[in-house]
Image (cartoon, helix red, strand yellow):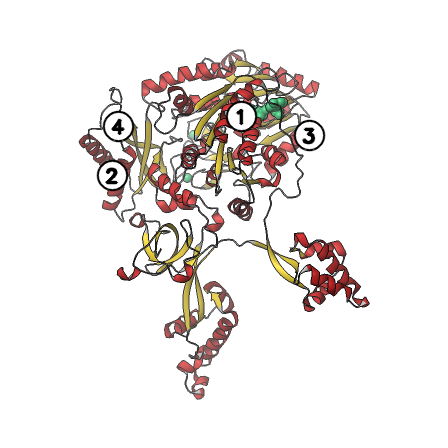
Amino acid sequence: MDIAKVIVDVPVRSTDRPFDYSVPDAMKVWIEVGSRVAVPFGHRTVQGFVVALEYGDVRAVPGLKPVQEVLDLMPPLSPELVELADWISERYACRKISALQAMLPTALKGKAERLISLGDEEAEPDAAIFPDEEWLPMFPGPGREERDIAEFVRGSGEVSMKQLARAFPSGAETVKFMLRRGVLKESQSIKDKLGKKKLKAIDLAVDPEAARDALASFPARSARQKEVLSYLIDLEAVLPMPLKDVLAALQVTAGTVKGLEEKGLVEITEIEVYRDPYRGRDFKPSTPLALTEEQQAAYDPIAAAVEERRHEVFLLHGVTGSGKTEIYLQTIQRCVDQGRQAVVLVPEISLTPQMVERFKSRFGSGVAVMHSRLSSGERYDEWRKIREGKAFVAVGARSAVFAPFSNLGLVIIDEEHETSYKQEEHPRYHARDVAVRRAEQGDAVVVLGSATPSLESYYAARSQSDIHFAPRLLTMSTRALGNALPRVEIVDMREELKEGNRSMFSRGLHSALAARLERGEQTVLLLNRRGFSTFVMCRSCGYVAGCPNCDISLTYHSRSDNLRCHYCGHAEPSPQVCPECGSEHIRFFGTGTQRVEEELGKLFPGIRVIRMDVDTTTEKGSHEKLLAGFRDKKADVLLGTQMVAKGLDFPDVTLVGVITADSALNLPDFRAAEKTFQLLTQVAGRAGRHSLPGEVLIQSYTPDHYSIIHASGHDYDSFVRDELRHRKELHYPPYCRLILVTLSHEEMSVALRMAENLALNLQGRARQRRWFGSLDKLSSDALDLLGPVASPIPRLKGRYRFQCIVKWRGSIDAIGLTREVADELEDSARDSGLQIGIDVDPQMMM
Ligand code: ADP
Ligand code: ZN
Ligand code: ZN
């Protein structure tokens, strides 16, 4: 093997292919597929990933540059992950480098750094230019400075440009001069953003026998040293151990240890420690529960597939409280018993300590947790625990699908319908599809679990026709603890208004709340903020305060009393009078959680409310503190946005109220009904999970909508039937697939012209291949195009946006074609500032 094929970290399309580098002999043992390397590229040093190794005659390729450095002793990616990255780049029309980088923790996204060292040993700094000492006084500045700089660099061997600039703030010219003459030389290296955390440790420097002998001949006055030595001999099995632990345990000083070190009996080394985000927390061990009959019936086929190491995808459709987690835990155990590893994906907002605890209490320190609320150091350490084989279960959000296990046997995706499994930025991958692909590569099992499966997964399971995956359906329709699903009542808010109730609480919800307060039971209140605006509007003329850069309304923030744009960050003071008509009746509109909290205080003086929304959960750990407070019954009501709907399990919650069920129903998104149904079902599942019966009240202005009616009846099947009928009529997924192409430019006319151009090219080429045509036709292959139209957010950060939607089905390469056309257009419009984004299987239509 002499040639390494490397994907370089240069984010332009022309470099989106492997480049060849020769492998120096000294590196041969270290370089593998998946290694991260530093390579010369143009005039720079960049980071890259080895995606293949080939035997070849390096001499036959003139100009082949060598790999400069191998950045990790253990390759951060396995060959399987490298292959998966390749698949991702095609499936989601993204660059290979961005797929590879998505697999690594941010700490490993190295940056090139300039390093300075001394040049030619003989070239004395000042002697080179000032051969004669007598010239020196005429150039006192540079001469002395050069000497100082050279001395500084000599002292440390290699210094970064940054360190040098800090030490000699005005020496830049001199350094440049020295570099030009070769007195100093420059090299580049890739620096990781973060190092491993190291700790001073103590170890025996001789074998225990010799140490014991030394102990016998110790002078009496060295009693302390003797004590340390015999302690280390006793604990020989766990050496090296942290020095500070030894000092603390024996109450000795570092001087004592130093004495032993000087005698050559112990040595001080360093050990790596993992930053454990859950350190110091006790997890009560839990043992497997005896499965219910329904659980057993779902568990058996999954366990069989795991046992046989056979790739299969299961869709576990189980109502809230049916005990899906216990099935996950026991299948993981099965997988681990075989010496394989498991990944559990959980939506970011459900990744609560409660959730983590369920896994930690069963699998202890074998669990690594990966989510964005950890610091990047913690994330890196959890990732390393996996890579180095110290963990066998990874629990995490979306990106945990890339957990670098060597022998992955099982992937579980809880709440598989959640849109957060789709990454909205490059690479725009869907963790579910990536998981299925990864499992396919490695003969692993996938379990998709949900009380409200996505229509895509459910339809695929039912029709067994999806080209990508067709899961086997497993159903659980009763709760594991035998209690009934809560009674759900819909309250027609139009009626309330007719009868003179202008409050945001219906009379029914009001009296239900009052009853809970009296009985000392708890309530969860959900404010569906999706699509709900907290904008500022003039009641006299209808003026709405909007962002000057983006065509969306500004959001009112009561804490700072200002208006902010959620897209670009623009902020301005809240207006006192309407800028259009001068009216004073301008104020913020819509209901925020704060408003509800105030109203609750007025209606029920003394009520204790815990509010959970983006404002109260920004700080690290705040989320869990709020929940712990509610669990300890420090509040009567938990009030919040979507966050309160997921995965929470509190025994004393007997009432769930939804303030407005339908705020999201009118969003320009074909999944609006599905999302509403899912949210209502989830939140209703929070009530009466234990011995106390639960009650759910849903307030709505459109109480006849099928998503609300079916959610109130816990009737997933009927909802799916109605919803699939709509989807089929309008040609939406799962009956076809979508590609959303967004073009943006600072000038509206250019953006529009380019969008039209793209649409024409796409149509033309699809027609050539005989793909183009209406999806109404019966043919199994079809492609249709919508647009161009202005995007739902027509202007963002000063750029005008237009979009086209490709609808397609069958086995045609619609993704490849779209990318081809977009690439060509971008090339032809080079330097004009045109940007084209491709989103395959978009989840957000906005
Ligand atoms: P889901 O994830 O399907 O909503 P959970 O896994 O949270 O349901 O289970 C609901 C409750 O039932 C939990 O309190 C859990 O401990 C309990 N449970 C699950 N399986 C069993 C079982 N086999 N025996 C006893 N209790 C169980
Ligand atoms: Zn006005
Ligand atoms: Zn803006």
User: Helix, strand, or loop for circle 1?
Assistant: loop
Q: Which residue is mark 4?
A: 783
Q: Marks 2 and 4, how far apart in space?
A: 15 Å
Compute the Cα span from label 3 to label 1.
21 Å
Between disc 3 and disc 1, the foreground one is 3
Residue drawn at (30%, 28%), measured in percent from left and top?
A: 807
Going from the N terminus, do you reach mark 2 or mark 1 first? 1
Q: Which quarter of the rendered image does ligand 1 occupy?
A: top right
- Residue placed under numbered mark 1 in the picture: 527
Q: Amino acid at mark 3?
A: Lys
On-image quarter of the N terminus: bottom left
Q: Is residue 104 above or below residue 578?
A: below
- Callout 4 touching callout 1 (CB < 8 Å): no
Question: Which residue is tagged 3?
Answer: 634
> Label 2: which residue?
821
Classed neighbour count for the residue bearing mark 1: other residues with Cα under 10 Å, few (<14), some (14–19), many (≥20): many
Disc 2 crowd rating (10 Å Cα; few below 14, some 14-19, many 20+) is some
Could you give the CA–CA distance between mark 3 and mark 4, rounded to whole angstroms?
Answer: 57 Å
Q: x%, y% of residue 287?
A: 64, 30
Going from N to C along the chain, the mark reached first, 2 or 3, is 3
